[in-house]
Image: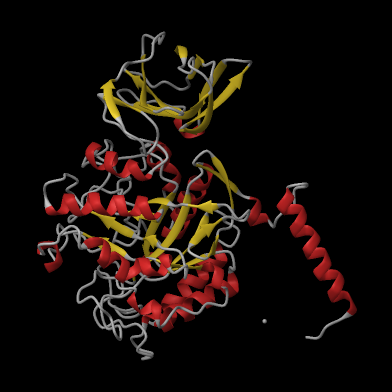
Amino acid sequence: MRYISKKKRSKFRFFEQLLIFIVALVVFFGSIIIKLPIQSQASLASNAMTMQLPLSTRGAKIVDAKGQVVRLFGVNWFGMETEIHAPHGLWKRDYKEMLAQLKSLGYNLIRLPYSVQALRSTTVSGIDFNIGSNKELEGKTPLELMDLIVAEAERQGILVLLDSHRLNDERIPELWYGDGFSEADWIDTWKMLAIRYKNQANIIGADLKNEPHGIASWGTNKRLTDWRLAAEKAGNGILDINPNWLIVVEGVEKNVPGQKLKTHWWGGNLEGVRRFPVRLSRRNKLVYSPHEYGPGVFDAPYFSEKTFPKNLSDRWQTGFYYISSQNIAPILIGEFGGRQVDTNSKEGIWQNEFVKYIQKKNLSFAYWSWNPNSKDTGGILLDDWQNIDVPKQQLLSQLLPIKFTSPDVQVIGGLGGNLTASPRLPLSGSSSTAQLKLTTDIYSNWDKGFCVSFKIANQGSNKVADWQLTFNMKQAEIYNSWSANFQQKGATQYVVTPLDWGRLIEPNKIRDIGFCANKRGNEYQPTEVRIES
């Protein structure tokens, strides 16, 4: 995104094949549990199911180690590719709180941009180390900071896709080399990361190069500019070290023999895959990743055609979706975004149409961006780095397992069904203390489930060093929670204790915790909610 721009046979071979066949049957019928390698044993809660890592591909689907189809619901959290060498917003927020917030909205993936220059640097900036857990980041190199963010993401059940976004800290280059860096520098950085994170299960893959454009080509067989050849070289080099990663390959902008569409976004042109597919040593690790934007980024001619917006689906089919519809490989939309989400402006119409398309085609995605400071698109967060752009998140929540509503309404109805708004009421039986004010409400409610938010505000002048919340809940089962430990005690009582980084609440600060649950009857709402300190 541009922002403020393969023998000999032996007599044992038969027995080996027989054993494999027997094991396959056992797994298929679920008679026993087979222990997988260390990385494969890692599991993450997602969409009320357990995702077994590592991920791979099967036709047009991304699947986990058990063969279950996986959808990735992601956001881009940029900053490590800029001069501060750190994700943006840490001058305002605790990094653990930031991760918890995006997880609470239903996202299960962060696409994490970096620059080669940053990972070779020793310093970070743009972080307030006095804010909560940010003190853990003080004195760290950019790589060590990445280690901590990735580890915390894993603890919170969030996947990470590493993105080689820039070479230097200033701009997105046309090619995978330049700006003072060679092809070897780019590949060696990827190999270093593949070694460093070989046992870090929640890092699921490598987005090889952000937005090849300009002179970058596909299928021309010119070693200096053919992005397809470079992607094969880097992808196979990574897989030789870390065979568990997905290799994510973006398109180019132009210079594709026989391309049908005149214009494409940077990284958005995957027309060349039809004749010139990327050839990896492990075919079940390849994912293609276009980028797509609206007129708020660039007002391309097709936005002004008389057939707009009906012309969009044909463009998407021609540009990238044929790869999925022909069962060649999965599609992950690596970036899309925009400021307008209404149904009147061209950008708003485009964004609504693309969200519908992603949902209809069951595609994985990473939205641009989490950050509010993307000049062309804005973000999911507002400029205060705290609050959510409500209309934008309401639109995106059509793609997510958690439905987002404004502070004034709750959603009633099935996921993906007709939604109606009704006045949102606080939970009954909530108590506060002299210093801590507890605000509780069901902010999303549908036929099979609901989500609850608890906000604990320190109204006093002194720090609160520890706190605990309790409530009763009869006919519901928690499947996702954030920013606290939710433990069931007995049949109906729950005790909620803060995570280590959340025990301390500064004066005039708020801890936002919560959970989503499946309904098991009509008496599902939490009652007798109490805060203690």
Residue 58 in sight here: yes
Residue farthest bottom in this picture: 222
> Is 38 located above or below residue 6 in the figure?
above
Residue 533 in sight here: no
Residue under the point 57% across and 73% down: 282
> Is 98 located above or below residue 472 in the figure?
below
In the drawing, does residue 125 fall left or right of residue 12? left
- The image quadrant where one finds the N terminus is bottom left
> Is 483 located above or below residue 17 in the figure?
above
Q: Which of the two residues, 21 or 297, is positioned nearer the viewer here?
A: 21
Task: Answer with the quarter of the image where residue 274 lies.
Answer: bottom left
Q: Which of the two residues, 249 or 85, is positioned nearer the viewer here?
A: 249
Task: From the top left corner, tell me how far across and down residue 167 is, in percent.
Answer: 34, 72
What is the count of numbered marks? Answer: 0
> Is 291 located above or below residue 349 in the figure?
below
Task: From the top left corner, tell me how far across and down residue 382 is, in percent.
Answer: 23, 41
Residue under the point 28% across and 80% down: 259
Task: From the top left corner, tell me how far across and down residue 449 is, in percent.
Answer: 45, 28
Q: Which of the two residues, 229 or 424, is positioned nearer the viewer here?
A: 424
Residue under the point 33% across and 42% down: 398
Task: From the top left corner, tell me how far across and down residue 203 is, in percent.
Answer: 51, 57
Colouring chosen for the image of the structure: secondary structure
In the drawing, does residue 450 fall left or right of residue 392? right
